[in-house]
Image (cartoon, rainbow, N blue to C red):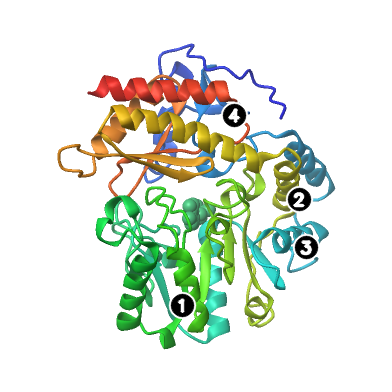
């Protein structure tokens, strides 16, 4: 993967530098404070594993713009494909005069998503919008209303997806009332779930609650992240997803995998459900799908997707030609550059380093994840209680040293490692050294 930007970390100014400070003053004066930023620095260029700011500082990227730039932030093929498309035409609206790129993305998704049944796809602009449409489709095709989601879930910030998201602050607080017919079931969370570590038992617990509190006859779909993202990179115990999917099949309930964060190569397979041999009825993709251009997809069984009346799905920009051109390039890069295997290499490296750190420091309660979606959960060693302040302090140290590190988790006590697959081992190791030094310093 070519990266025109020098692949080294560099701090040229104290952070934030003078130009970023000036831009931050303008941001404060012009942009709603509701739109916050993790780092107080403004980007000008990004490539490989580096983001450069307006003051010439270069940061190691452990965030990929929240799991989006899996192939890098300026991958050559994506740039070329989008450049060609922008010169040809920027938009016609697929619902007015369709174009090939949209159809080609749908064909690729039929090939890449789990299962060899006949499939159809509809394209949208954001993960939230796609999740909403998955629910619309599930309701339309089953004739039922209720939707089940899980503890720690994150499905977006629109009205329906706020109802589906678990965490109040900052996603829901003050923004209600929320959409109805959304019910929450217990998740399998092996690290905090001592009584139900077995995936089948955890599924039975969830199913029991669904049967008594909702009823399969009222339930259109369960929507679940195969590896939870914002909720803390929670990987359910083996067998949990498969048992839920089996129950869905037996009860005319659709199994919807929200793969917005975990999909598109991020976990070392095209989709994270593949690790559990689950074939969902509907798969939702977004984030990593188009190398940073806004695109999201709902891909499902042909009979489910085609149950919707003509004209029932769509949107002005959904499947915009620039985003489709980018997605086709991303798929080509992932396939021809062996990036799924690269994700598994990154997994081994991160799990190895973080596992060693956990051996030496009992404040790291758990290290988990798949592929280039790895997390460390911080706890108070005496009680096992979540230590959000520690995660925040370690992330702040990383930021101050030129590493873009993100936290997550219901209690904010998880640091997540989401590097682009285009990052070098050297940058990854350097970033891990800095995180480790941060942990030492905070003690
Ligand atoms: C980010 C995310 C969403 C929402 O996607 P947006 O593009 O931000 O609307 C939905 N589900 C999951 C699992 C996500 O990580």
Q: Earlier in the sequence, mark 2 or mark 3?
A: 2
- Assess whether mark 3 and mark 1 are in contact (beta carbons under 8 angstroms): no
Q: Where on the picture, by quarter, is residue 201?
A: bottom left
Q: Is residue 259 visible?
A: no
Q: Is residue 285 visible?
A: yes
Question: Label 3: which residue?
Answer: 103
Q: In the image, which is nearer the foreground, mark 2 or mark 3?
A: 3
Tag of residue 83? none
User: Dividing the image into 4 quarters, which one contains the C terminus?
Assistant: top left
Q: Earlier in the sequence, mark 1 or mark 4?
A: 1
Q: In the image, which is nearer the foreground, mark 1 or mark 3?
A: 1
Relative image position of residue 234 (x, y in whole percent): 39, 51
- Assess whether mark 3 and mark 2 are in contact (beta carbons under 8 angstroms): no
Residue found 15% across the figure and 38% down from its top:
382
Relative image position of residue 289 (x, y in whole percent): 64, 50
Q: Earlier in the sequence, mark 3 or mark 4?
A: 3
Looking at the image, the residue that sits furthest to the right is 88
| 378 versus 147 height, above or below | above
Counting other residues with Cα less than 10 Å from the Cα at mark 3, is it few (<14), some (14-19), or many (20 or more)? some
Which type of secondary structure does the marked residue at label 3 adopt? Answer: helix
| 334 versus 297 height, above or below | above
From the viewer's side, name the closer residue of 77 and 274. 274
Residue found 39% across the figure and 35% down from its top:
28
Question: Label 2: which residue?
Answer: 90
């Amino acid at each position: 993967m070519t990266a025109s930007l020098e692949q080294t970390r560099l701090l040229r100014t104290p952070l934030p530098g003078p130009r970023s400070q000036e831009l931050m003053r303008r941001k404060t004066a012009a942009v709603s404070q509701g739109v916050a930023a993790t780092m107080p620095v403004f980007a000008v260029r990004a490539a490989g594993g580096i983001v450069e700011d307006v003051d010439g500082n270069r940061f190691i990227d452990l965030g990929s713009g929240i799991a989006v730039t899996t192939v890098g932030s300026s991958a050559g093929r994506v740039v070329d494909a989008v450049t060609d498309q922008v010169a040809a035409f920027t938009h016609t609206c697929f619902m007015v005069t369709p174009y090939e790129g949209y159809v080609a993305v749908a064909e690729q998704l039929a090939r890449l998503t789990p299962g060899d049944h006949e499939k159809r796809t509809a394209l949208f602009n954001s993960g939230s919008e796609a999740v909403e449409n998955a629910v619309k489709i599930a309701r339309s095709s089953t004739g039922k209303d209720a939707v089940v989601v899980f503890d720690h879930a994150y499905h977006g910030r629109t009205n329906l997806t706020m109802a589906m998201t678990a965490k109040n602050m900052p996603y829901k607080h003050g923004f209600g009332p929320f959409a109805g017919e959304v019910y929450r079931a217990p998740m399998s969370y092996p690290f905090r779930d001592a009584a139900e570590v077995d995936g089948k038992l955890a599924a039975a617990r969830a199913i029991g609650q669904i049967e008594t509190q909702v009823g399969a006859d009222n339930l259109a779909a369960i929507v679940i992240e195969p590896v939870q993202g914002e909720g803390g990179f929670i990987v359910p115990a083996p067998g949990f997803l498969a048992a839920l999917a089996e129950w869905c099949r037996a009860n005319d309930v659709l199994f919807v995998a929200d793969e917005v964060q975990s999909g598109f190569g991020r976990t070392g397979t095209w989709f994270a459900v593949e690790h559990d041999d689950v074939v969902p009825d509907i798969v939702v993709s977004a984030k990593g799908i188009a190398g940073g251009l806004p695109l999201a997809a709902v891909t499902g069984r042909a009979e489910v997707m085609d149950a919707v009346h003509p004209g029932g799905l769509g949107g002005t920009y959904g499947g915009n030609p620039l985003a489709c051109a980018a997605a086709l390039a991303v798929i080509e890069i992932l396939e021809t550059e062996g990036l799924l295997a690269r994700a598994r290499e990154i997994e081994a490296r991160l799990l190895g380093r973080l596992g060693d750190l956990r051996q030496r420091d009992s404040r790291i309660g758990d290290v988990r994840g798949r592929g280039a979606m790895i997390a460390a959960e911080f706890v108070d060693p005496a009680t096992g209680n979540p230590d959000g302040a520690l995660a925040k302090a370690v992330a702040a140290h990383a930021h101050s040293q030129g590493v873009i590190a993100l936290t997550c988790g219901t209690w904010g006590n998880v640091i997540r490692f989401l590097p682009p697959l285009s990052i070098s081992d050297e940058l990854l190791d350097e970033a891990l050294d800095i995180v480790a030094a941060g942990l030492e310093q905070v003690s």
